[in-house]
Amino acid sequence: MSHVVAEWAFTQGLKKLREASENSNQSEIARRIGKSRATIGHYEMGRYLPSHDSLEIMLDAYGHGDRATYYRELRDRVEMHSPDWWEDEFPEHFPPQSMALLAGFEYSATDLRTFEPQHVPELLQTPAYAEALLRAELADHRADQLTLHLRMLRGRQAILNRADPPRIACVLGEAALRSPVGGPLVHGEQIAALVSFANRENVDIRVLPDSSGRPAGGASGFTELLLPPDIIQDFSDVVYVATPVDRIHYESPDALAVFRELWDRVWAAALPAEDSVELMADLARRLTKDAS
């Protein structure tokens, strides 16, 4: 498990247990462990780690003393701080926290479900396609920023080639296939790459045809990441949405239910896997012919 995800699971898990407890008052919990009220907030923000003794007192107060073993192990994972793959690869200011957490979730997830109506999802992008998109999105940024983002994307994509890659289910809007990103050659290579990905046992790519319309709430893409329940017990999954400003993740049951319902609708409306691959392969051939 990624270190950044271990820290997130520990801090947010403690906060979630406290807020759901009858003993949710931070001052009372702090009194029981002999600390200041602010210390509880620091624990829940990851600034400090509680001792094993303090942790057990807190969990008992929350009514979850039976979770002590899990939280001790999670706490020790955080304290050990096994560096995530990007920590030694980039300057201190990069990647931003939201991107680092996304990369950690991708590294830790067992399954990813992605809906993207406009563009090919990042994890499935070719280098040339990714660069063309980033040049448009980072038009006002320096060249070194573009280089950092491309290097970060290559590192994130490495999960697809490891011995135990996550399972990926992807619904692509037909518009995402036809959007001429980078010109016919780049576009054709990208579609051909999607066909290649779709032939992997762990990847299922389906096309949502324009004729099916756009499901309510499906104006923007999202990715649902399912987390290993034996390692992350309090959070089954998270959903990420990219905005023009930042990447936002959702973890509350109500928000997740909305995205799961939307996923079920777009998955049901998409073409079957074989028809989707045939459509993509035909488009790749035509684009390659146009480029030549």
Image (cartoon, rainbow, N blue to C red):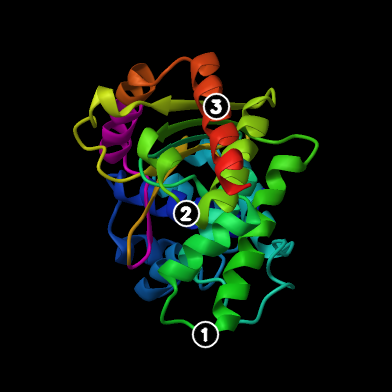
Q: Tag 2's secondary structure? A: loop
Mark 1 → mark 3, Cα distance in angstroms: 38 Å
Q: Nearer the viewer, residue 210 or 99?
A: 210
Q: How crowded is mark 1: few (under 14 residues within 10 Å), some or many (20 or more)?
A: few
* Residue that appears at 58% across and 43% down: 188
Instruction: Say which amino acid is labelled 1.
Output: Arg
User: Which circle, 2 or 1, is nearer the viewer?
Assistant: 2
Q: Is mark 1 on a helix, strand or loop?
A: loop
Seen at 54% across and 48% down, the residue is 187
> Tag 3 or tag 1, which sits nearer the N-term?
1
Mark 3 is surrounded, within 10 Å at the Cα level, by few (under 14), some (14 to 19) or many (20 or more) other residues, namely few
Q: Position of residue 283 (x, y in %)?
A: 52, 32
| Camera-side residue of 162 and 63 | 162
Is residue 73 toward the left or the right of residue 282 in the image? Answer: right
Using the image, determine if residue 220 lies above or below residue 257: below
Q: Residue furthest left?
A: 216
* Residue picked out by circle 1: 142
Q: In this rendering, would 19 be left or right of 72?
A: left
Report x, y in % for residue 22. Answer: 27, 45
Name the disc covering residue 181, or none.
2
> Dot 2, how many residues are within 10 Å of its Cα: few (below 14), some (14-19), or many (20+)?
many
Q: Is residue 105 visible?
A: no
Find the magenta span and give its range: 245-263
254 in the magenta segment = yes
- Residue at the spot of label 3: 282
